[in-house]
Image (cartoon, grey):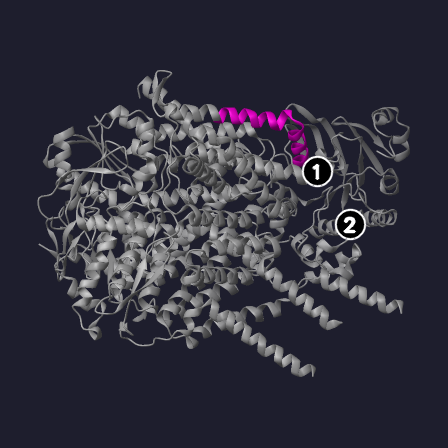
């Protein structure tokens, strides 16, 4: 009796530990079912935006825009009848976790594409797995350019698209003494490289170029430097929560945007909502999209977004590409036979895809896989929204290597000219 | 540097120092008297900021009207946490690192799930939104307000610690718990109140910095690290030390960042901390060393 | 075995903390092989005197000499290597380690990090360590974790740790504090045995114990040496009686 | 009758008072766990899972390193990630140089340097053309750096929380400098887009069993080396210093030398772990030497039981594994950090000596029940 009971106990212990093991590492038991990407009338995609951690404050809205686009497509019949199944992961604002989760989406979940990332560091961290495993990454954020990967579709702006019209306009309107301030990482440094080239051509003077640590929130000395150097334009590529602190302390310090405006490539409705209209009013931003842009597509987008996520939510120039790039994905996949659906065929099908996005008609450049966009210049009002002062006369070609004329991104990769 | 610039950086340094002091004061009291290494201190700061946001958004209270409620709310929360968790850990202070880290993680996610993960806006009181002339320099009125407020809080705390029976009891427990208990001092109750007071101060700090900085769930993390530097440098059982180390760090940051930039300022200030602690491990203003 | 060679000498030692003179020109010397008791009312500076010898506190001025070496500028471990061992008032043994491991650590023939890194077995020392344990009556507790020992046993263990160092001079700060009558008596016996090989300086309050072990007694007062002599000489000394007047009397101080 | 009682009471005292387990049983337990680790690839043949488990093992190595310095020698090093990151950068630099011909043609500069308009390879990059140099650097740079810092602190008798604050401050400074010196270090992006490690014609694929075995081998070596250190007389002196630094000094030991050695040994393991991490993650990032990971290591050791090398290692693997699988499950997508927070609080309240301590007392309980 005793023996029997023991062996029973043993068995149940084994059983219990097996249950524990499966619940802890569920993926052990999911074997590679098939190699086909689109099976059972489903197309699996990864959604990789931080829901926690420091950049979660912005990436959360990118996640929301992406999910909404997927839901809309599924509600209107999917892609040729196939549903898009999103696998959402939280990379927690940490490059290593980004890399780990990207691996899961590519290797384990066999996603056919992944939508994700905000920072350059996280994009660089996930690149190896997409390049070595021939998958496709859709990156919605404006970035510093100088990348020519065959495994990334870039739907955000590159420096020439944000600056070519913005910088000359500012010089004409405010003057030639510029103060460049950015967060200490590659995006601001590269944007400033490009900016300095433009300023040189316009005969301007850079009175200071400075970088603050990421996440910095004490701008007292910076504001004092503004006061003592008195630049005509403060060109800001400060990102994230630091933007809010910079604007609020600028205003609290008694500076006036009439004579010393901040011109930013990174201040969107999202940050303005957190700094208050008062602190934002009078400063300029250049971007392909603003929430107030008047077009039927944008009205639909903004209404749907607020209905889905809450009336107090805002859309901005990174959430808009997060939204429209899913539709571009749909258009590309639609062209394919279900048995042909794979990352490389989707990439080929994406080349030259056109659609009318909330910002206007956009197109994927076949050579660079970057996007033709509509740069706009906006000035912030005290109600927290921008007023659009000017838009480029045509969609602007993305030139990721514009500052480096001896290099060119082509369909065959980076070429030295 | 011309004299106005020097004056202006001096005041900027004081302003940075006052924010450091505001954030560090609660930590100094908790760590100095109970030995608890409260890694969740930054989250109390964050909760203070979110309380300000919630009171403004849902009850239309401005910052001045909310301060009292914020103090009470965060202090109450601190007291509950002390009663439920920290109370069991006084005998093993190192373990408080793990427990308070856990509490911090929970608070961050609880706020994210309830108040949302995006940046939040706390309005600056309109009376203080402009800049004023102070000693010949143009300074933000709100920064001056923070300066005065944190000085007042410091004096109040000092009074509490050295002039009230609560403070006497607390210091007795800190110096010799056994003797104190033989005199009938209820250390349990005193520690609970101390923790609550420290948490309440952190909450006030969060509310006061929220109009100058940004409010989001992770905002507390940088503050707790800075606050620990201030407290340890000042000497863990010296309130005066905390003030002086905040002023030293604030002025250093101010002048170095004006001459070069904030990255170099941060690095050099940290190196200064390393060297000061190495050659004065008991802290700048304390003769005792907590092990 | 007591010889007349002077082993330890403190000359005009001053120690001041923030203006307070804990030692105020102390002169103190001990001969090789002696068992010297050091007594005095509270705050007389007895513990500080031991601190000065073992390097825990640095003298503001004055000379501390051990045999031919000047200890004034040496660090604690260097002083220990000169042959001085110290037992503290609050017993300090390694609570999480077994009695044997405690003794092993204390046995400091070789103090280099790297050579100790390749030392896993006790070898010849084992016997020595067991003998030491026997000396303090802990031979049956070699594998017991030190934190589980009784108070008296802990005191003995610390004494054994000192002996393991094999120092020429052993400094004891209130070794019988907290011991029962019986344990105190055993300790006295132990000290008399130690005296054969080591010089001992014992700070003690318990006059019964002091009488049991001490040849010569030194009395400190207000950071200075007040008197020196046998137990009966000391008890009759007027100055000593006055010094103790403030406290509860010489036997029970 | 009374003799029996006496015997029994003696027995209970002994089980409570004596050290749990002897060295032999400890070695056997350690060996069994390592054997289990080696068996994993033969059970699981999945690129993603092997890659993931490889990273868990590396975190385990970090926990061993901290257990050695904190659990044994009492040095709460909040800069443990510094050694980890330096090791990681050394490996990334040499692997980056191997990709150079592919990226920038004949000039031979890593791509990010070209982006930053660097014209010639910086001096400190030159020796990393040699793989052997890089591997040695990956261990000895962290070791030398830590020992220097240790010497600076411990010769000044810095202890306890002050060690934590100094190591933390130094970590933040180095992190800031690496981010700031983008031209040489790749800045916040780190060093990305690396070649696959190839030694003697043998390729270590980040997603294959080769890299996994490589890590398992080094983990085993580190675990047993660390165990050997703790069993040596030096290891016992570490513990003595942890419990009573001054007491040890009065025995004649130069305590600072032992502390410097402890922090150095722990840095060697962390540096090695960093190099392996670069191999499986395929990049190096300044976040590898961040405050967050440094604090995480402390948490792993506390959960696993910092006085036990194996406990700390398993603590790391369990916590990281739990974080991974909780955040992957749809149910906990939004609440996984909440769950982790509660786990930490509960472990502290109910398992003061971590998992290792809980297991020890459980086994002791079972043993004494068997004796009844």
* Front position in the image: B91 or C222: B91
Residue in view at x 60 percent, y 50 percent: D242
As measured in the structure, the alpha-carbon distance from the residue carrying label 1 to the one carrying label 2 is: 29 Å
Q: Count neighbours of disc 2 (C-alpha within 10 A) and say few if under 14, some if 14 to 19, many if 20 or more.
A: some
x and y, in percent, of residue D338 in the image: 48, 54
Residue in view at x 61 percent, y 49 percent: D241
Hey, which quadrant is residue B16 in on the image? top left
Question: Above or below — where is D217 with respect to B125?
Answer: below
Residue hosting label 2: C151
Q: Secondary structure at mark 1?
A: loop
Magenta stretch, main secondary structure class: helix
Q: Which residues are magenta?
A: B150-177
User: Numbered disc 2: what chain?
Assistant: C
The reply to whether discs 1 and 2 touch (Cβ–Cβ < 8 Å) is no
Residue furthest to the top: B136
Q: Secondary structure at mark 2?
A: helix
Seen in the image, is D45 located left or right of residue C215?
left
Residue B186's disc is 1
Q: Quadrant of the C terminus of chain D?
A: bottom right
Examine the structure image and report whether residue B174 is included in the region drawn in magenta. Answer: yes
x and y, in percent, of residue D16 in the image: 72, 61
x and y, in percent, of residue A402 in the image: 13, 48
């Amino acid at each position: 009796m005793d023996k029997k009971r023991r062996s029973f106990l043993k068995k149940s212990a084994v059983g219990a530990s097996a249950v524990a093991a499966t619940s802890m590492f569920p993926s052990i038991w999911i074997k590679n079912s098939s190699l086909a990407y689109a099976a059972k009338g489903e197309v699996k995609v990864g959604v990789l935006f931080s829901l926690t951690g420091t950049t979660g404050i912005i990436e959360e809205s990118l996640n929301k825009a992406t999910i909404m686009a997927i839901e809309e497509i599924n509600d209107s019949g999917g892609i040729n009848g196939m549903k898009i199944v999103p696998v959402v992961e939280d990379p927690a604002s940490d490059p290593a976790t980004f890399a780990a989760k990207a691996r899961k989406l590519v290797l384990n979940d066999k996603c056919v594409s992944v939508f994700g990332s905000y920072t350059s560091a996280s994009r660089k961290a996930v690149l190896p797995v997409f390049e070595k495993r021939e998958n496709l990454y859709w990156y919605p954020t404006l970035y510093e350019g100088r990348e020519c990967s065959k495994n990334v579709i870039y739907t955000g702006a590159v420096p020439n698209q944000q600056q070519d019209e913005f910088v000359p306009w500012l010089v004409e309107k405010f003057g030639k003494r510029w103060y460049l301030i950015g967060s200490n990482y590659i995006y601001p440094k590269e944007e400033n490289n490009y900016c300095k080239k433009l300023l040189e051509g316009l005969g301007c003077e850079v009175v200071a170029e400075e970088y603050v640590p990421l996440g910095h929130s004490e701008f007292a000395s910076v504001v004092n430097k503004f006061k003592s150097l008195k630049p005509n334009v403060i060109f800001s590529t400060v990102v994230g929560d630091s933007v809010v602190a910079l604007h609020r302390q600028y205003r609290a310090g008694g500076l006036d945007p009439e004579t010393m405006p901040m011109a930013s490539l990174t201040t969107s409705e999202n940050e303005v909502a957190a700094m208050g209209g008062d602190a934002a009013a009078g400063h300029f931003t250049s971007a392909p999209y603003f929430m107030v842009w008047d077009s039927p597509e944008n009205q639909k987008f903004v209404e749907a977004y607020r209905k889905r996520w809450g009336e107090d939510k805002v859309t901005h120039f990174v959430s808009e590409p997060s939204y429209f790039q899913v539709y571009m994905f749909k258009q590309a996949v639609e062209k394919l036979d279900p048995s042909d659906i794979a990352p490389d065929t989707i990439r080929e099908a994406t080349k030259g895809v056109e659609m009318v996005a909330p910002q206007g008609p956009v197109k994927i450049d076949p050579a660079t896989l970057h996007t033709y966009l509509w740069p706009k210049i906006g000035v912030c009002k005290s109600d927290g929204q921008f007023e659009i002062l000017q838009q480029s006369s045509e969609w602007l070609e993305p030139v990721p290597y514009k500052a480096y004329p001896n290099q060119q991104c082509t369909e065959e990769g980076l070429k030295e000219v | 540097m011309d004299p106005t610039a020097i004056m202006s950086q001096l005041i900027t340094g004081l302003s940075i120092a006052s924010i450091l002091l505001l954030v560090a004061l609660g930590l100094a009291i908790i760590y100095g008297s109970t030995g608890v290494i409260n890694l969740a201190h930054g989250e109390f700061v964050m909760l203070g900021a979110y309380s300000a946001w919630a009171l403004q958004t849902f009850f239309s209270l401005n910052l001045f009207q909310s301060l009292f409620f914020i103090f009470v709310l965060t202090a109450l929360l601190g007291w509950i946490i002390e009663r439920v968790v920290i109370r069991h850990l006084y005998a093993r202070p190192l373990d408080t690192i793990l427990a308070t880290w856990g509490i911090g993680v929970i608070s961050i996610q609880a706020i994210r799930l309830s108040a949302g993960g995006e940046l939040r806006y706390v309005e600056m009181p309109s009376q203080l939104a402009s800049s004023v002339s102070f000693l010949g320099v143009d300074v933000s009125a709100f920064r001056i307000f923070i300066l005065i407020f944190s000085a007042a809080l410091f004096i109040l705390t000092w009074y509490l610690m050295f002039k009230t029976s609560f403070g006497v009891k607390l210091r007795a427990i800190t110096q010799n718990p056994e003797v104190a208990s033989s005199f009938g001092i209820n250390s349990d109750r005193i520690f609970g109140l101390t923790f609550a007071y420290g948490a309440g101060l952190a909450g006030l700090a969060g509310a006061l910095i929220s109009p100058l900085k940004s409010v989001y769930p992770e905002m507390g993390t940088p503050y707790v690290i800075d606050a620990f530097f201030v407290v340890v440098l000042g000497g863990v059982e010296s309130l005066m030390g905390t003030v002086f180390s905040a002023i030293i760090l604030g002025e250093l940051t101010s002048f170095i960042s004006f001459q070069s930039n904030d990255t170099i300022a941060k690095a050099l200030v940290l190196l200064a901390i390393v060297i000061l602690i190495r050659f004065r491990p008991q802290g700048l203003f304390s003769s005792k060393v907590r092990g | 075995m007591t010889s007349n060679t002077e082993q330890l000498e403190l000359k005009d030692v001053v120690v001041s903390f923030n203006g307070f003179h804990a030692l105020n020109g102390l002169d103190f010397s001990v001969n090789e092989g002696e068992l010297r008791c050091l007594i005095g009312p509270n705050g007389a500076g007895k513990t500080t005197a031991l601190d000065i010898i073992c390097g825990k506190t640095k003298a503001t001025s004055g000379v501390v000499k051990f045999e031919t070496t000047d200890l004034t500028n040496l660090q604690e471990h260097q002083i220990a290597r000169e042959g001085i061992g110290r037992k503290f008032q609050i017993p300090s043994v390694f609570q999480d380690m077994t009695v044997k491991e405690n003794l092993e650590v204390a046995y400091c023939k070789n103090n280099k990090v790297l050579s100790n890194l390749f030392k896993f077995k006790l070898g010849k020392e084992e016997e020595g360590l067991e003998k030491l344990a026997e000396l303090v009556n802990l031979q049956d507790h070699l594998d017991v974790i030190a934190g589980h020992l009784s108070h008296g046993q802990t005191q003995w263990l610390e004494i054994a740790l000192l002996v393991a160092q094999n120092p020429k001079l052993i400094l004891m700060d209130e070794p019988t504090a907290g011991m029962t009558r019986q344990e105190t008596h055993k300790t006295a016996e132990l000290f008399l045995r130690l005296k054969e090989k080591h010089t001992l300086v014992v700070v003690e309050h318990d006059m019964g114990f002091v009488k049991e072990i001490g040849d010569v007694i030194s009395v400190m007062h207000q950071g200075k040496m007040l008197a020196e002599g046998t137990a009966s000489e000391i008890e009759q000394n007027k100055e000593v009686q006055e010094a103790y007047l403030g406290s509860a009397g010489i036997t029970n101080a | 009758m009374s003799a029996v009682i006496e015997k029994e009471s003696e027995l209970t005292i002994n089980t409570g008072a004596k050290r749990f387990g002897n060295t032999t049983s400890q070695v056997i337990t350690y060996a069994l766990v390592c054997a289990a680790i080696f068996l994993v690839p033969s059970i699981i043949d999945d690129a993603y899972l092997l890659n993931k488990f490889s990273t868990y093992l590396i975190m385990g190595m970090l926990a061993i390193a901290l257990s050695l310095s904190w659990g044994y020698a009492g040095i709460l090093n909040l800069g443990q990630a510094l050694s980890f990151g330096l090791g990681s950068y050394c490996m990334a630099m040499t692997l980056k140089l191997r990709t150079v011909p592919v990226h920038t043609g004949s000039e031979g500069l890593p791509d990010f340097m070209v982006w930053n308009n660097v014209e010639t390879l910086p001096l400190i990059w030159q020796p990393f053309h040699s793989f052997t140099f890089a591997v040695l650097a990956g261990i000895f740079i962290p070791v030398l750096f830590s020992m220097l810092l240790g010497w600076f602190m411990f010769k000044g008798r810095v202890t306890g929380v002050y060690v934590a604050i100094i190591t933390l401050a130094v970590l933040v400074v180095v992190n800031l400098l690496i981010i700031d010196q983008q031209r040489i270090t790749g800045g916040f992006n780190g060093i990305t887009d690396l070649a696959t490690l190839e030694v003697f014609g043998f390729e270590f694929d980040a997603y294959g069993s080769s890299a996994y075995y490589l890590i398992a081998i080094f983990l085993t070596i580190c675990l047993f080396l660390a165990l050997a250190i703790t069993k040596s007389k030096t290891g016992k002196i570490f513990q003595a210093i942890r419990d009573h630094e001054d007491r040890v000094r009065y025995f004649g030991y130069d305590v600072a030398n032992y502390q410097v050695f402890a922090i150095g040994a722990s840095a060697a393991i962390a540096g090695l772990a960093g190099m392996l991490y670069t191999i499986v993650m395929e990049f190096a990032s300044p976040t590898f030497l961040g405050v967050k990971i440094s604090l995480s290591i402390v948490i792993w050791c506390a959960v696993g039981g910092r006085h036990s090398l194996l406990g700390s290692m398993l603590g790391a693997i369990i916590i990281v594994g739990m974080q991974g699988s909780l955040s992957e499950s749809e149910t906990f997508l939004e609440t996984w950090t909440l769950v982790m927070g509660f786990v930490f609080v509960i472990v502290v309240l109910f398992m003061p000596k971590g998992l290792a301590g809980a297991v020890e007392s459980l086994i002791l309980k079972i043993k004494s029940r068997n004796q009844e």
